[in-house]
Amino acid sequence: MYYSNILLFLLVLVIALSCTTSSLETTAELISIDIENGPKTDNPEYEVDLVRIIPLETTDESIFGVVNRIEVVDGRIYILDIQQGKGIYVFHENGDFIGRTKNGKGPGEMLNPFAFYVDHVENRLVVWDQSLSSLFEFDYNFVLKNKIRSELFIDDINSVQGGKLVHFEDEKKGANTFALFSDELEKLIYFQDFSYDSKHGSQYLDRSISVGSETLLITPNHYFIYGYDEKVIKPKYEIDFKEKSLREEDLKEGVEQIWERILGKEKVSFPLSVFESHRFIGFNVMYGHEYSTFLINKSTNELIQLADFIGSPKLPKCRILGSMGQAKDLFYGLIEPRDLIKFHEENRDVELMPKDSVPQPNDNPLLILLDIK
């Protein structure tokens, strides 16, 4: 369902990493991961508990396709579907469908919503449309409050102290970079040379900017998680999958060979998204046919691989996509209906939800909430 994004992501790796460089000092904490042989979770005392499974209402208007990003905030579930629905779908925390953005060229309509965030201060949904080169600001009832035209080719955007932090393609450098702009995207406040020799590629990440108690960044061609603070970007973690990491020589083989290596579990992709909870920093990678989610304890650097718990007799197969803020360690993800049906068939003594609530195969995915203890 979401592999097309990953295939495009791998395609740009061939171009992007042949001469990858960065002006940033690599003073990062090294996190070594043996994804195949373990031990995977450093501390066996960690527990992952199922909090809730929420069916997302399925109607002709609410059904979505490929999930490019999801945010769960302020009692609402926001889902971005770039490829099929070309919109942002909003559900109540109980799963009821609230509405979606409209397609078109009329007032308040969009053609290609590409990135978004929820502004808690202004109570607005902020959406970047790649085709219209415009930033749309809606209230929570989808009423357009502001529209900002920009010539930037934006891949991701979020609000931080002092303005908007933007991940965009710098045409002068022929590379992607991060910069801080004024709220109206008119004035460049801060720019750090973060060019990493990739003319394209960051648009295939699920989330390259995470704003919480700290601001975290990832790029499409590094095994690094960066921190942004006081107009400075610094490497925070370097993720080392040892012999499973993609090297320059691997990328010379071509996209089909790279794809075969990752699907065949010979290699692990670069981080595709980054997020933060109270105790952990999380990131996703592609390994085999699945997304693998890792959590780094911010205090101890202990590592949790959620694959140790997901797919077990206790929890169904799911894709973890983010966290519920920085006050707790509650994580959310999506379960495909077929995976939940299969789980119930194989674990008849485990009832995750009432039998009359189990979805049909073609229904929307279900939201899952997990608590790390």
Image (cartoon, grey):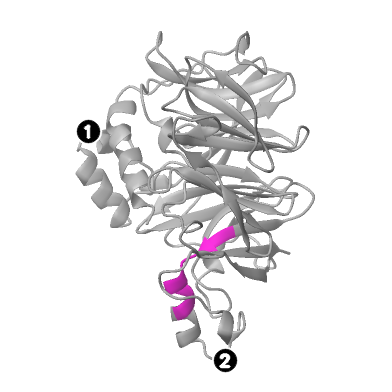
* Residue in the foreground of this view, choosing between 352 and 139: 139
Vertically, is 336 above or below 221?
below
Check disc 1 and give the amino acid type. Answer: Lys
Vertically, is 322 above or below 11?
below
What numbered label is drawn on residue 264? none
Q: Residue furthest bottom?
A: 349
Q: Residue furthest front?
A: 106
342 left or right of 115 in image: left
* Residue in the foreground of this view, choosing between 204 and 131: 131
Region of the chain picked out in magenta, as a range: 333-341
What numbered label is drawn on residue 349? 2
What numbered label is drawn on residue 252? 1
> Does dot 2 land on a helix, a strand or a loop?
loop
Residue visible at 37% across and 14% down in the picture = 174
Nearer mark to the viewer, of 2 and 1: 2
- Percent of width and height locating residue 225: 56, 35
Is residue 337 covered in magenta?
yes
- Percent of width and height locating residue 50: 66, 71
- Percent of width and height locating residue 235: 58, 29
Check disc 2 and give the amino acid type. Answer: Asp
